[in-house]
Amino acid sequence: MDKQNWELGTQAVQGEYWPDNAKARVVPLEMSTTYRYDTCEELAKVFDLEQDTNMYTRISNPTTDILERKISLMEGGVGALATSSGMAAVSIALLNICKKGDSILVSNTIYGGSYTLFTTTFKDIGIEAIVFNPDISEEEILGLAKPNTKLIYGETIGNPLANVIDFEKFSNVAKKLDIPFIVDNTFATPFLCRPFDFGANIIIHSTSKYIDGHAVALGGIIVDGGNFNWDNGKFPELVEPDESYHGVSYVKQFGKSAFISKARVQIMRNFGMTPSPFNSWLINLGCETLHLRMRKHSDNALKIARYLRDSNMCEWVKYPGLEENQYYTLAQKYLPNGCSGVMTFGVKGGRDSARKFINSLKMVALVTHVADSRTCVLQPASTTHRQLSDDELVACGISPDMIRLSVGIEEPEDIIADFEQAFEKCR
Ligand code: PLP
């Protein structure tokens, strides 16, 4: 059976692990930093990238390898690299092709941590973030690009605004500029959206979110679509010999997997943002139920969004699954299986009411997280987006009264009952 043709749910459960006779049925946890070799000659081949086996866990590990191959299969990529966190995935993916003197085109409706990374740390090392509103036209985005622009970056579903990006527009910009389109697919997961089908070249996930799904393990992953020609004169670091690695040319040696191979043997080897094999094992276990959970998250979220829309205590609610939402049409096109579990809303009475509402919740918890099985809330202006100035907050569409809600997989009646009693306290 060709596992590329399996349904996504089957890939999530069984993808890329089949035990040998009488071996563990469940993905084994190989908690080892090192690997034994019979001869110096054999180990030398691994160092020379001639033999694809493990040498040291900072670079690869058998348990992590199964997770990487599974997510790559689910996204339809040519290879993946798991990382210690989502931020590590974002950093490695971008530093793989950007250096001092380059610029990047970045949507401004992205996770606050990524936004801060691009606009401060990257700035400090000489990489300029050209920030744009993802709803502007293709021509306007093209007008912002510079000759040194190396990529365009967005999130399938933005955190926290739950806006959906127009993949066709992003992909057209990338093609016209001959640069890769990198997308953070954390909130959609491959179950709701497969960005390579819509022109993306590199996918990033914070696996700490839905892919783990249980809020037990921090992690990230980069998936390579193998669908970008790096030998176009703009990315010499993938074509020219890498003196730091025995003069290898990634494009020549690895072909379609050049990007992800360089990310592993150069950036990961040097920075070491490696996941623990135990985290990879936990994330793989969580991933086995991804398809079941994403259905339930999306169904629940739609019910809760409708409840909030009809509640006289709620000022506004933004969820791309609601017909009246600005992103409904894009969601129908790119997220036909559901719109995931994240939405934002405002409580009548503004900032103070929002705080009172959150403080009154009894089952729904206030946590710095989203996208796990338990429903949770957070006020972005005082937490995730705290570093941003008022002007930046407004530019990113974050209002002081905004509550970010991540709908879990409990039964929706109980979430609504908790909201009802909390709203009562705000009257
Ligand atoms: N990307 C998105 C969309 C996120 O929501 C987050 C974290 O919330 C990250 C990346 C960073 O991931 P991590 O917290 O695993 O470093």
Image (tube, rainbow, N blue to C red):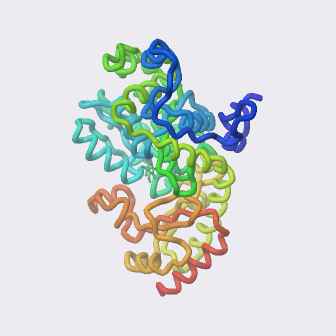
Identify the image quadrant of residue 312: bottom right
Q: Is residue 182 visible?
A: yes
Query: Residue 403: percent from the left, percent from the top?
Result: 45, 68
Q: Give me the residue at 67% from left, 37% from top.
A: 15
Residue furthest to the right in view is 1
Identify the image quadrant of residue 400: bottom left
Q: Give me the residue at 51% from left, 47% from top.
A: 279
Image quadrant containing the N terminus = top right
The relative height of residue 358 versus residue 190 in the rendered view (above or below) is below
Closer to the camera in the image, 344 or 242? 242
Q: Give me the residue at 66% from left, 47% from top.
A: 288
Query: Residue 40: percent from the left, percent from the top?
Result: 45, 15
Q: Give me the residue at 36% from left, 51% from top.
A: 113
Q: Specify whether 118 is left or right of 38.
A: left
Query: Residue 389: percent from the left, percent from the top?
Result: 26, 59
Q: Is residue 198 visible?
A: no
The relative height of residue 196 versus residue 251 in the rendered view (above or below) is below
